């Protein structure tokens, strides 16, 4: 069970600046259990965004968003609505957000922070995806997580050791910053990397912050 | 002038700058530093003192800087994010500024896996670009990273590193733009052996007008042996050593290889000097400091200007 909570509305709105329409995605698994992105929260977010002047051409709540095959299938049914949107706002944990980012060629905004995996893994087991760092940065990195997948946790990467798509630390590790640059190039949104990403709030991370009993 | 840095004075005077590099010892012996500093003195405008390069434990950069400065040189302290969080970084920045060190190179740092303590916990609280921004905020706004103000700010000439040869190549100029935007005053590049690729990168840099925002020092280094050239070519990530470099060194008798390596370095200096926007060189004769005076002189960069530190 991945435990997530919604990011502050102001932060979400800052991600949507300059965009008119946004497609919403939620999850009936963990996010519904933690009231961060189930049916109810997706409906509420739709109303809130419309009140703020945004258009929401559609939304979908997937049973298990971190199940890549299922998510790809479900999103395919909303192809036209997604095409009509400027971006996708995903209300769930880091694993689910990254599943959507990989499944669709569209800018994906994280709507939640992932506080803890509560000892469990997401369905997407092929690689480490989310390190429960509590202050989700996927907005700045094309929906791929450098906290989980960059050896130096760079937020303004890539470093000088990226070669042929591999990490200098171990050639069996793909350089996530190469993947980030490739993904945003494909979307025509490399400009997203012009932003200087500020020092991260580690205080809310499970490993660097105070030992909080998030399950209680 | 933002600082009392000799390097800043040289660069602001539009003089083609020369920086050197000094590696501290894996011991508490100050004499190693004094010996290396004496060799460099008079031949460089400033010199870097590495901060646990390749993640091997050595004397702290700031301490070696203070020893070397007694020899009358302008040190550039290197500071990595690998070993310090934002609290430690800011404390060290205040300390070095209070001790009169004027230059700092902001680095993320070589990963701990490459060093002699591979099971160490890497810190990486900030990355190099965030470190640059933090130093600039301290210097220009008198603010700590948390936003609190300080009465006396550190006057630091801010440096950064850039690797024009790493992937993704198309993004490398954009990354330099981020370092410039964050507040870096000068940048030293990875060692240039592939001059054509470096020139291509410089064109992308000029297209963005970055050469007017940040002083660019091209990294150069003499190669001592064919083996060293091969090692850099095949084993060091982010290094680009063209075949021509290896064959040139192979083409001379064994006892002349190091001489040829120096000649090659001088040739590269002359070539990068012709590229628009290159403001100087960063000469890295690591564990071969004796080669520095000869190279600087033969490249026509001697004597160094005396602008008064």
Image (cartoon, grey):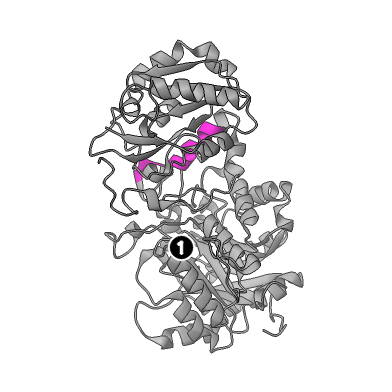
Q: Residue at x 49, y 51 (%)?
A: A159
Task: Answer with the quarter of the image where residue A94 lies.
Answer: top left
* Viewer-nearest residue: B43 or A158: A158
Q: Residues within 10 Å of mark 1 (few under 14, many from 20)?
A: many
**Residue B98 location, x and y as percent?**
55, 81
Is residue B136 visible in the rendered image? The answer is: yes
Q: Residue at x 50, y 55 (%)?
A: B247
Residue named by callout 1: B86
**Residue B241 within the magenta-colored segment of the rendering:** no
Pick whichever, B278 or B154, lies toward us.
Answer: B154
Q: Quadrant of residue A15?
A: top right
Q: In the figure, B33 relative to B270: above or below?
A: below
Q: Main secondary structure of the magenta part?
A: helix
Span highlighted in magenta in the image: A171-184
For the residue pair A119 and B269, the one nearer the viewer reads as: A119
Q: How many marks?
A: 1
Which residue is at a point 52% across and 34% down the rendered structure image? A182
In this rendering, the answer to whether A107 lies above or below B115 is above
């Amino acid at each position: 069970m991945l435990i997530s909570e919604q990011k502050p509305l102001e932060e979400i709105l800052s991600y949507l600046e300059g965009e008119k329409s946004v497609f919403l995605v939620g999850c009936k698994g963990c996010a519904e259990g933690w009231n961060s992105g189930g049916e109810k929260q997706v409906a509420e977010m739709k109303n809130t965004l419309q009140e703020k002047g945004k258009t929401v051409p559609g939304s979908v709540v997937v049973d298990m968003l971190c199940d890549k095959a299922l998510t790809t299938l479900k999103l395919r049914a909303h192809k036209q609505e997604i095409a009509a949107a400027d971006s996708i706002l995903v209300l769930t944990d880091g694993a689910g957000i990254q599943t959507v980012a990989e499944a669709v060629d569209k800018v994906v905004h994280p709507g939640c922070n992932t506080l803890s995996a509560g000892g469990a893994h997401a369905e997407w087991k092929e690689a480490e995806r989310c390190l429960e760092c509590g202050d989700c940065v996927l907005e700045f990195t094309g929906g791929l997580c450098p906290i989980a997948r960059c050896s130096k946790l760079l937020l303004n990467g890539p470093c000088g050791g990226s070669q042929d798509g591999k990490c200098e630390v171990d050639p069996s590790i793909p350089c996530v910053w190469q993947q980030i640059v490739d993904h945003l190039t494909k979307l025509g949104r490399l400009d997203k990397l012009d932003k200087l990403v500020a020092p991260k709030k580690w205080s809310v991370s499970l490993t660097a912050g105070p030992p909080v009993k998030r399950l209680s | 002038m933002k600082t009392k840095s000799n390097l800043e004075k040289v660069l602001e005077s539009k003089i083609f700058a020369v920086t050197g590099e000094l590696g501290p010892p894996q011991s508490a012996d100050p004499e190693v530093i004094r010996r290396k500093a004496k060799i460099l003195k008079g031949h460089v405008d400033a010199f870097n003192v590495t901060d646990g390069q390749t993640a091997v434990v050595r004397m702290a950069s700031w301490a070696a800087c203070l020893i070397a400065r007694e020899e009358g040189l302008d040190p550039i302290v290197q500071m990595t994010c690998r070993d310090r969080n934002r609290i430690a970084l800011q404390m060290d920045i205040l300390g070095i500024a209070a001790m009169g060190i004027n230059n700092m190179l902001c680095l993320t740092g070589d990963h701990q896996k490459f060093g002699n303590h591979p099971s160490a916990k890497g810190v990486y609280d900030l990355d190099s670009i965030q470190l640059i921004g933090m130093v600039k905020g301290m210097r220009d706004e008198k603010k700590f990273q948390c936003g609190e103000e300080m009465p006396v700010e550190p006057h630091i000439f801010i440096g950064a590193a850039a690797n024009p040869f790493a992937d993704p190549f198309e993004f490398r100029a954009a990354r330099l733009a981020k370092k410039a935007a964050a507040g870096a005053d000068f940048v030293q590049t990875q060692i240039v052996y592939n001059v054509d690729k470096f020139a291509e990168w410089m064109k992308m840099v000029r297209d963005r007008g970055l050469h007017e925002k940040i002083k660019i020092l091209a990294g150069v280094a003499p190669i001592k042996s064919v083996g060293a050239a091969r090692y850099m070519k095949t084993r060091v990530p982010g290094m680009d050593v063209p075949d021509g470099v290896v064959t040139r060194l192979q083409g001379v008798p064994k006892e002349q290889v190091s001489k040829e390596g120096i000649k090659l370095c001088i040739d590269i200096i002359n070539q990068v000097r012709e590229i628009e926007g290159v403001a100087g060189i960063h000469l890295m004769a690591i564990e071969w400091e004796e080669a520095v005076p000869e190279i600087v002189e033969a490249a026509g960069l001697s004597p160094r200007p005396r602008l008064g530190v």
